[in-house]
Image (cartoon, grey):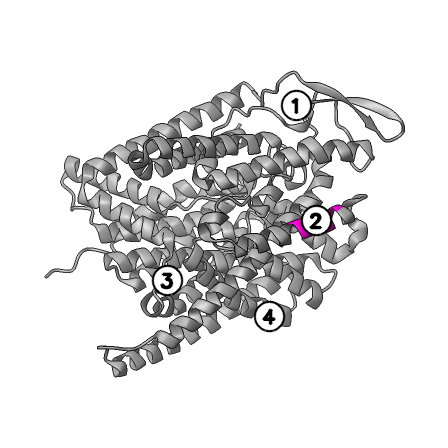
Amino acid sequence: MKAPHELTVRAVLTGMVTGALLTPCNVYSGLKIGWTFNMSVAAGLIGFSVWTGTARALGTRTWGLHENNINQTAASAAASIISAGLAAPIPALALLTGQTLPWHVLSIWMFVVSLLGVVVAAGLRNQLLERERLHFPSGVVTAETMSDIHAGGKEAGQRLRLLAAMAVLSGALKSVVTKFALGPLAPPLQWKVAIAGGKSTNVTAMNLGFALDPSLLMVGFGAIAGLRVGISMLIGGVLAWGFLAPIALQNGWAQAGTATGVWFAPLVEWLLWPGATLMVTASLTSFLISIAGVIARWRERARSQTVGGVNETTNVATRFFGSAALWVSFLFVMIVAVTAQVAIFQIAVPTAIIAVLLSYVLAIVAARVSGETAITPIGALGKITQLTFGVISPGQVTTNLMTANVTGGAAGQCADLMHDLKTGQLIGATPSFQMIAQVFGILTGSLVAAAAYLALIPSPQTQLITAEWPAPAVATWKAVAEVLSEGMSSMPPATVPAMLIAAVVGISMALVEGRLSEKAARFMPSGSAIGLGFVIPAWNSLSLFAGALGAAAFVKAYPGVAKKKLVVIAAGLIVGESLAGVAGALWDMLL
């Protein structure tokens, strides 16, 4: 039987072009809310529709499932490049030190740290997929979706048209809002708040951000995140901006803004400390609980694992040669990554080596956790690295942030490739071909993401941690780096007790959730999501909750339709506004 076409030039180029289109979306959304979207399904739909249409019109060769798998692997690798630092450590470094990397240096840096993750994933594939057979849920969803659309082209065309329609709707709304400088619409509510010095001031709903935002981006994210996260975000937004913000004003811990303006910037300087603490403690505790579970299951598998009906001599030989090649790859990539740290950020060689070795270990951890839960704990792993180097290199902000950047980039790219390799395993693809496609994808993502970031954020110090660009992940990484370098004296008044309370709440919520059954845990608010509500405008939390509520109603009323089309609708809303935002920034640069 003739082998199907797989690693073809058109498959790789399609993945690179699709990735170049989708990468700016994750840069945009990462800086808006700190979240990104897995682009595998969207890339598969786009690739299938384009080449199926070309085959009908021009008679080109049929676009097969295995070629499409190479396309989605490269495209998702490009889009996941955001884990290489653009939504957190790189902007945080600019805020703290003023250092903004030029496009070519930024591209090289992201490519190098992402390459670490590819090498780790290559070494983990046999163990995690063949021997332990971890689930990797996103990979399973991608395999099921692509098998479905290749089995029947009509369904794929309908999904792509729906994706395009939602993208046009969302992008058009963003363009209109930008063109006419439309902002959130708040109800005409106001009340008096006593402030420090015996004075009082009028506070409006708009001042605190309780408004309806003319944007569909957060609605799309809410639909994907689900009702639990949506409710948690609503709780966080109301608690932070409706309760704590007035208290901070009354006690002089934070200052009011202009009477008719949004007071996000002055208030978030105080709120980010308890908010970031809640996010970090909740996510780290959940991460440690999940690691304990992964270790327990791994030990159980190790005890029960047998080798039956398999040529063990062949297995040993394969593992030996594979290990030899991987050790060479590990060493080569480590040298490149150490060189990049030293040359770009003047990090000491021993420190840079420790950062790479720690990144290898934590990337393995990330892959296991992602394989079990579908959640890649990039933020939690970054905090572990920040805390580690806070001890190794105290007071060095650049070292603290950029060593953690190495860890996050490696972990994110490793997990992304493992999910893609799971897709390939289910459809019978060639793993080595996918790894090659992944490298082309991160090359594309590095070049495009660096350009998109510099176009969107030409002035990090004036643009970030504002109502327009909340950048919650940037605020969190910046806060941790400040505390580790300057101590508690760097924080606004009364933040230490607020952080202690937030830490107790975050740890307690995670511990309670860890003891609940999977069914019961769905009704437990997320500490991380509540903390996120502290560091983004209240209108974002309201929009995200609306999206989650609408999606839940859609699933309840039309479960069959929602299973196939809900993610497509949400992806279209996210992609449309993101691309319109990036296009608007590029247009402004050209004028």
* Distance in Å between CA atoms under marks 2 and 3: 40 Å
Q: Earlier in the sequence, mark 4 or mark 1?
A: 1
* Distance in Å between CA atoms under marks 3 and 4: 29 Å
Q: Secondary structure at mark 1?
A: helix
- In percent of width and height, residue 8 lies at 24, 54
Q: Amino acid at mark 3?
A: Leu
User: What residue is rendered at 56% in x and 20% in y?
Assistant: 182
Magenta region includes residue 264: no
Q: Secondary structure at mark 2?
A: helix
Which residue carries the number 3 mark?
Answer: 134
Question: Is residue 166 left or right of 504 when viewed as pictured?
Answer: left
Q: Earlier in the sequence, mark 2 or mark 3?
A: 2
Furthest-top residue in this view? 188
* Distance in Å between CA atoms under marks 1 and 3: 48 Å
* Up/down of 225 relative to 250, above or below: below
Q: Which mark is residue 96?
A: 2
Which residue carries the number 4 mark?
Answer: 354
The magenta segment: 498-505
Which residue carries the number 1 mark?
Answer: 206
Between circles 3 and 4, the one closer to the viewer is 3
Magenta region includes residue 502: yes
Between circles 1 and 3, the one closer to the viewer is 3
Q: Amino acid at mark 1?
A: Met
Q: Nearer the viewer, residue 184 or 575?
A: 184
Q: Earlier in the sequence, mark 3 or mark 4?
A: 3
User: Is most of the magenta stretch helix, strand or loop?
Assistant: helix
Q: Nearer the viewer, residue 427 or 466?
A: 427
- In percent of width and height, residue 361 lies at 52, 68
Question: Is residue 118 left or right of 91 when viewed as pictured?
Answer: left
User: What residue is rendered at 43% in x and 30% in y?
Assistant: 550
Quadrant the N terminus occupies: bottom left
Q: Tags 4 and 2 in contact by the CB under 8 Å rule?
A: no
